[in-house]
Image (cartoon, rainbow, N blue to C red):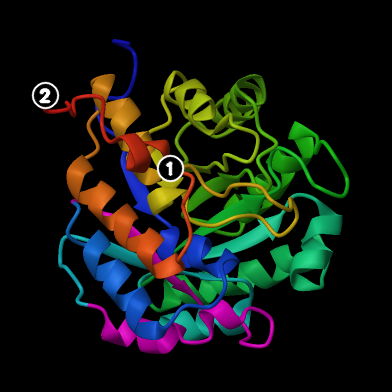
Amino acid sequence: MTDLPRRVSLREVGPRDGLQNEDPVPTGAKIELINALSQTGVSRIEAVSFVRPDAIPQMADADQVWRGIERTAAIRYSALAPNLRGARRALDSGFTEVEVVVSASDTHNRRNVNRGTEESLDDIAVILSEAHGRGATCQVVVATAWGCPYEGDVPVSRVLAVAGRALADGADSISFGDTTGMATPRRVTELVGEFRSAYPDVPLNLHFHNTRGTGLANVLAALELGVDDFDASVGGLGGCPYAPGATGNIATEELVHMVEDMGVATGVDLEAMIGAAAEAERIIGRQLPSQVLRAGPRTRTIPL
């Protein structure tokens, strides 16, 4: 364990990636959830995405949510955009950190944003230029990095080519997204190892789903390669429209519970995050998949 990072940076994606996969919830409830998360010690929150309301009605109130939250100076808030129009809305709203997404799988990209991967990369090149011109940073998220629900396995060479094009166009960092939970520790080691060999100094974020129960095992594999930046979703909030019945992202409190016990700092107050997970469960109105939410941390004892 001595070779693991001493500290990891967590981006809480529940308000965006989590709620985007649920039935629409009221704007006020979204604001309450983000405000609760802002009190947990997490340093980054992906608050909203700027998408067409008819395509993703769950995010139709992105502007109202962003205006309504109580922003904390110590937290970096970001927004996700699927295209140039969404990125401009995010920048116009005052975001200084934007994530844009492109799928390594051409089929998935067409299903997701109605265009091929190369077309999205052309669009992203314009977004990167505009974001930098307006003083913002832009991370490129490569979705289906470990597999596509339509095409199956996506070659590592293909994933690296998409990331390389984004970096050549000026991406500030790269995130690999396990869109439908197809990653395993072996595949994480392969992709991250190849990426690190090609781009040793590029900031790398990993976004895992727990669709097939390997989410935290994938985190451990990445930690052993020195990765220190992960996405997670409070309560395991969310799901996947391409894997019916599947759980969503890895739960933030479960990630914190595991890595802190391994001596890896997160800066997150675990009890406060469990409380935020309970709030998320109340808002959604169904039981969330987080086991730490159910059982509490391993240090919690039962009174005789």
Residue at 55 percent of width and 68 percent of height: 20
Q: Is residue 38 left or right of residue 292?
A: left
Circle nearer the N terminus (2, 1): 1
Mark 1 element type: loop
What residue is disc 2 on? 304
Give the residue type that dot 2 points to.
Leu
Q: Residue furthest left?
A: 304
Q: x and y percent of residue 155 in the render?
A: 80, 34
Image mark count: 2
Q: Residue furthest front?
A: 304
What residue is disc 1 on? 290
Which range is magenta?
41-69
Nearer-the-camera pick, 257 or 163? 257
Q: x and y percent of residue 158 in the render?
A: 78, 41
Whether residue 182 is situated above or below residue 25 in the rendered picture: above
Quadrant into which the C terminus falls = top left
Q: Quadrant of residue 199?
A: top right
* Residues tagged 2 and 1 counted as in contact (Cβ below 8 A): no
Mark 2 element type: loop
Q: Which of labels 2 and 1 is toward the front? A: 2
Residue at 26 percent of width and 22 percent of height: 261
Please tell me whether residue 48 belongs to the stretch shown in magenta: yes
Q: x and y percent of residue 243 in the render?
A: 74, 50
